[in-house]
Amino acid sequence: MIDCGEGTQMQLRRSRIRFTKINHVFISHLHGDHCFGLIGMISTFGMLGRTAPLHIYATEEMGNILRIQLDTFCAGLGYEVVFHPIDTARHAVIYEDRSLTVTAVPLRHRVPCCGFVFREKPTLPHIRRDMIEMYGIPVCQINNIKNGQGWRTADGTVIPHERLTTPADAVRSYAYCSDTVYMPRLHEYLKGVSSLYHESTYADADEERARSYYHSTARQAAMVARDAGAGQLILGHFSARYDNDQLLLDEARETFENTCLADEMHVFDV
């Protein structure tokens, strides 16, 4: 989960996402709309009988607040809350497992803030079952073939790895750029991401306001997506001053065409 504002539990239930599926929560910064729902969710997990650890990634300040909240509201929780402090000024890997890495990306807001980039690790190519059966290759050799080996038949013919496999799935990546003023070099951290979420609080006419409040315009978000070579851009965090978010979408699409608006309960294919 990325950020945890008020109403998170309601949205999880509406989405039919099981609470037990959430094991890692990444908090971008200490503004209420990004973290007010965290302690309530932690408490609910405990009441539901959770036993698996829950890992929280956030600034050191959040760690201090969380410890007080846990002591005050969650005595006898029943599971461990593991806190991982993030240095929001550093571009660094903060989580890694067999399938992906999560990297913190420095952002510029009114308080320490960072974004996150989730990148899948490359997978092995797919085995061609028809070729395996044709050449009578034993199952015990499949992993060797996936890792690049060919196969030698009984008459000494070598069947190259490329004939026995099809290419691996393309690696997917998702970047989340929370509240930030426009950063001309931000795209350098986001090169080639499949999908980019970028805040787009303001329209062009309010660019000065965006700068003074350390937010971005929709067009600036599109510039980041364009310069990063992103596959698609998802805009969010719209100011309530606009009656119609279509204005933000139109301005962004003038710079980066494959742009869409975030909307509650909408599912995007990354």
Image (cartoon, rainbow, N blue to C red):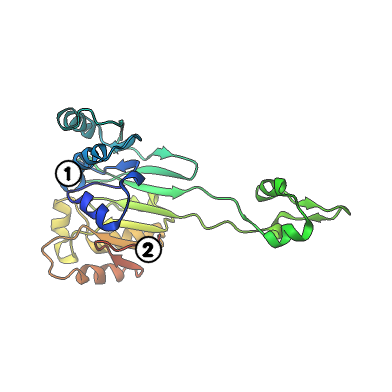
Q: Which mark is residue 222?
A: none
Separation of residues labelled 2 and 1 (CA atoms): 29 Å
Q: Amino acid at mark 1?
A: Phe
Q: In the image shown, does 88 or 60 lie closer to the viewer?
A: 60
Which residue does the numbered mark 2 point to in the structure image?
232
Look at 42% across and 53% down and name the residue there: 173
Residue 36: x and y in percent read 17, 44
The residue closer to the viewer here, 124 or 202, is 124
Residue sitting nearer the eye, 199 or 32: 32
- The quadrant holding residue 238 is bottom left
Q: Position of residue 107 (x, y in %)?
A: 27, 46
Out of 159 and 227, give the one closest to the viewer. 159
88 above or below 187? above
Residue at image location 69% in from the left, 46% down from the top: 144
Q: Residue at x 19, y 65 (%)?
A: 204
Q: Quadrant of residue 259?
A: bottom left
Which is in the foreground here, disc 2 or disc 1?
1
Earlier in the chain: of badge 2 and badge 1, it is 1
Residue at the right extreme, as displayed: 155
Residue 222 in the image, given as x and y percentages of width and height: 31, 62
* Any part of residue 38 in sight: yes
Q: Which residue is mark 1?
A: 36
What is the secondary structure assignment of the residue under circle 2?
Answer: strand
In the rendered image, which quarter contains the C terminus?
bottom left
